[in-house]
Amino acid sequence: DTGVSQNPRHKITKRGQNVTFRCDPISEHNRLYWYRQTLGQGPEFLTYFQNEAQLEKSRLLSDRFSAERPKGSFSTLEIQRTEQGDSAMYLCASSPGGVQYFGPGTRLTVT
Amino acid sequence: QQQVKQSPQSLIVQKGGISIINCAYENTAFDYFPWYQQFPGKGPALLIAIRPDVSEKKEGRFTISFNKSAKQFSLHIMDSQPGDSATYFCAATLVGGYNKLIFGAGTRLAVHP
């Protein structure tokens, strides 16, 4: 399968714990996006990487959130001190420029 | 100014009927308007897209109609099939905005046999 992959697919954590998600984009796609989708809503933009450079961050991305894309390949999204409001689907998309191809998402549940 | 408003929230159509989903936007700097289809447990997948210099685009059973003056665009699904049952999102991207997608809230479509 050469699509965007995300791991884990599901994560249940207790409030206050840290979690990290991984996204593996389609090979050679230099653009990578993270979005968050809550139940019954459309995805909301979180952050954008072009190669290894993080070029844009939404104000939704509080200080508890950090994203990296070392060497311009896979990306990680870390949430520190999780809160119940962080419960959502976290989607990653990659693009060669133009169309964005989404992964299946990581569903986070904070109890 | 960043919002894209989508309606209806849910839609039930009989097999063979036409499904119509509408979106409206405020920001005239938007320059690309895609529609995404999402099945449960999957990420959104691009269905069809249009740029504002075109009033209509058709791909198979899917058509986008675009009204630049009204700042509205719509998705028409002709001959709707049960396999089309999914959530549909309209979206828009900003000029110079790194192509980040701004999504509508989604329409849950159910096509009954």
Image: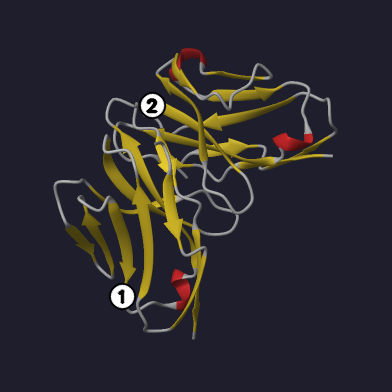
Residue indicated by mark 2: A31
Q: Which picture quadrant has residue B84?
A: bottom left
Q: Which picture quadrant has residue B73?
A: bottom left
Residue indicated by mark 1: B78
Question: Whole-percent x and y of residue A102?
Answer: 46, 42
Q: Nearer the viewer, mark 1 or mark 2?
A: 1
Q: Quadrant of the N terminus of chain B?
A: top left
- Measure how far apart labels 1 and 2 are at the Cα level: 34 Å
Q: Report the chain holding disc 1.
A: B
A22 up-or-down from A67: above or below: below
Question: Whole-percent x and y of residue B13?
Answer: 45, 79
Question: Whole-percent x and y of residue A46?
Answer: 53, 29
Residue at point 42%, 34% (across, down): A94
Question: Whole-percent x and y of residue A31?
Answer: 38, 26
Q: For the residue carrying disc 2, how many other residues have a C-alpha within 10 Å: few (<14), some (14-19), or many (20+)?
A: many
Observer-nearest residue: A19 or B4? B4
Q: Which picture quadrant has residue A79?
A: top right
Residue at point 52%, 38% (across, down): A44
Element carrying mark 2: strand
